Amino acid sequence: MTDPGQDLPVEGSLADARRAELAGRLELVRHRIAAATKAAGRSDEPRLIVVTKFHPAADVRRLAALGVADLGENRDQEAAAKSADLADLDVRWHFIGQLQSNKAKSVAKYAYSVQSIDRIQVVDALAKAIAREQDATGRGDLECFIQVGLDDNAGAHRGGAGPADVEVLADHIEAAVGLKFAGLMAVAPLGADPEAAFAKLAAISDAVRMIHPDAVGISAGMSQDLEAAVKFGATHLRIGSDILGSRPAVG
């Protein structure tokens, strides 16, 4: 049988090189996660979410072939297009960017989780959109993470609700049909010690779980600070550039 790749040797070799590059980068990150988990005295490795923003759907397909099951996107337009193009893949899409209420209907069509909830209006919009989508397609409940601002001036740099607002948001999510309160998400403030930031997040999570015991998720840690996040209990890591490399140039 003729190998279809023989007709396109240059493109095929480039694709193989990209797959090899992704495989190598992915292996290094997985080793870092394993080492950090061991150093923290944990037996449960966090879930790896590979952040694919700005990278093509072809890279997502390569990652899926390498065993990646969870993908993160920041912009609805890009996420909606990729999830539609790659509907044949058995992957979970996590929306991790700032969400406007008018995008909830679109996000409800593909997202397994939304990790950036910081306002009551977003909760209400998602609840309405998920109800409509569940009636139409029977999709499962949407996992919801509250994004917590860890800056002293909460939200000044990286977004998120203030720690004092978390409980009201959590109660609102729990009361909404079709939404599942999964836990908290945060980004370490720019220039701050990530260990101090994630220790603060862990303390907020402990307080939340006193009232919402099933909300055990902590989505924290990116390429530059995953070890600190694992040390302080992260259950989800959002890694982009260390796996996919620099943002592709726009030609």
Image (spheres, rainbow, N blue to C red):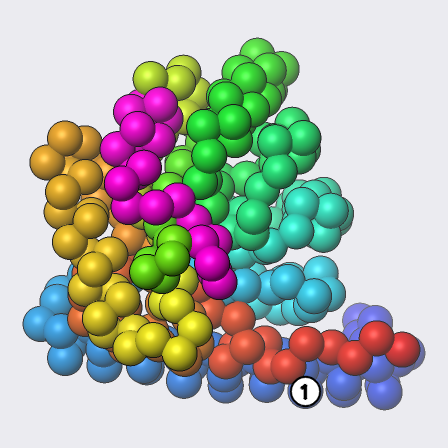
Task: Find numbered disc 1 in the image and state the secondary structure of the residue it sits on.
Answer: helix
Residue, disc 1: 17
Q: Is residue 169 left or right of residue 215?
A: right
Q: Please determine whether, in this image, residue 68 is positioned above or below residue 194.
A: above
Whether residue 47 is visible to the viewer of this picture, yes or no, is no
Q: Residue at x 50, y 86 (%)?
A: 24
Q: Please determine whether, in this image, residue 65 is positioned above or below residue 186.
A: below
Q: Please determine whether, in this image, residue 176 is positioned above or below residue 98.
A: above
Report the front residue among 156 and 236. 156
Q: Residue at x 29, y 77 (%)?
A: 193
Q: Quadrant of the N terminus?
A: bottom right
Q: Is residue 239 left or right of residue 87?
A: left
Q: Please determine whether, in this image, residue 142 is positioned above or below residue 159.
A: above
Whether residue 22 is visible to the viewer of this picture, yes or no, is yes
Please state the horizontal and vertical placement of residue 226, each as a whole percent of the image. Answer: 33, 73
Q: Residue furthest front?
A: 153
Report the front residue among 15 and 32. 32
Please state the horizontal and vertical placement of residue 32, each as a whole percent of the image. Answer: 32, 81
Q: Is residue 59 left or right of residue 27?
A: right
Number of numbered discs: 1
Report the front residue among 12 and 36. 36
Residue type at the position of mark 1: Ala
Report the front residue among 155 and 115. 155
Q: Is residue 201 left or right of residue 221?
A: left
In terms of image quadrants, where is residue 104? top right
Q: Is residue 173 magenta?
A: yes
Q: Residue at x 35, y 23 (%)?
A: 172
Q: Residue at x 57, y 12 (%)?
A: 135
Please state the horizontal and vertical placement of residue 118, each as a whole percent of the image. Answer: 44, 40
Query: How many residues crowd around disc 1 within 10 Å: few (fewer than 14), some, or many (20 or more)?
Result: few
Magenta part of the chain: 155-174
Q: Is residue 56 magenta?
A: no
